[in-house]
Image (spheres, helix red, strand yellow):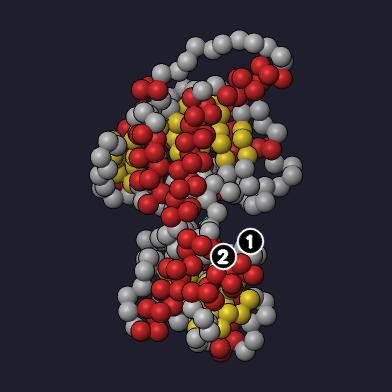
Amino acid sequence: MALLFLSINDDPGVWTRTLSALMPGLDIRVWPETGPAADIDVALAWKPPPGELRRFPQLKLIISLGMGVDHLLQDPALPSVPLARIVDPGIITQMAEYVCLAVLHYHRHIDDYERQQRERRWRRLPPAETARRTVGLLGLGAIGSHTARQLTALGFPVLAWSRSSKTLAGVDCFHGPEGFEPLLRRSTVLVCLLPLTGETKGIIDAVTLALLPVGAYVVNCARGGHLVEQDLLAALDRGHIAGATLDVFQREPLPAEHPFWTHPKVRVTPHIAGITNPGTTAPQIVENIRRLSEGLPLLNPVDRVRGY
Ligand code: GLV
């Protein structure tokens, strides 16, 4: 059983050591030093160059090195072998932290206080009411559900929208196209946690933004493809949207000349809201390699048609 490790984001040394400790003897090849292509049975990949996985004629399983799989499915030449993703408790925790941080930042007027500090100005702003800071989450999978619970624990009213009908205690749930507008109309912070699919591409556009209450905030820590960047810039400049916290972009790294870098109402982070952790995910990767060799059903299989 040979495993191909292919990622330009992740440290192959750490991954190789962590996987080998759990499955001694596992033959790990680090791309691009793959050895004979016919040796490779499983690929563990993050953003492989399009067409690259096609080179391995004996490939039996592709495992995404992230919770999202859009980076694999966008390859038209992706081999039609089973596909699994990781569901990383570490990423889930980090994503919820990122969202809570962004919501609290806006809620506690930290932008204003940072500006005041630059001006050496001592002025207390009236506190905002937690019970009126309704947060609308797009996506109610593992990340969305945990984030909803954390926000609820902080006292924020939480709404969530998903493709199909779901329920979560303490959260007002909406689904499908007819549930989208009612959620937007009440969301003072809109948070995108959706998988990127044909249906969700460009979901935060001028129409969506216009349905949010005046002064709402946008947080995108899913994929850059969810957001129509020009539409957000226009809504920020018009004053309809008060601010945006963005971790993901149409082009990554965000080009140096992109207006988001210097926009006074935009906060940029370099796709760090949830970083895959070898310690918390290697066990499920090894388990899937074992399941493959024993012909057992995989953990976290991906439905290619649904796109996640
Ligand atoms: C990160 O973006 C992931 O998909 O895990």
In three-dimensional space, the C-alpha distance between marks 1 and 2, rounded to whole angstroms, equals 8 Å
User: How far across and down, in percent of the image, does residue 280 sit?
Assistant: 47, 60
User: How far across and down, in percent of the image, does residue 38 sit?
Assistant: 56, 89
What's the residue type where badge 2 is placed?
A: Trp
**Residue drawn 37% across the image and 65% down it:** 300
Mark 1 lies within 8 Å of ligand 1 (Cβ measured): no
Closer to the camera, 124 or 142? 124
Q: Quadrant of residue 229?
A: top right
Q: Is there CB contact under 8 Å for labels 1 and 2?
A: yes
User: How far across and down, in percent of the image, does residue 285 sit?
Assistant: 46, 70
Q: Is residue 281 above or below residue 109?
A: below
**Residue drawn 56% across the image and 88% down it:** 39
Picture mark count? 2
Q: Secondary structure at mark 1?
A: loop
User: How far across and down, in percent of the image, does residue 248 sit?
Assistant: 57, 47
Q: Is residue 47 left or right of residue 255?
A: left
What's the residue type where badge 1 is placed?
A: Asn
Mark 1 lies on residue? 9
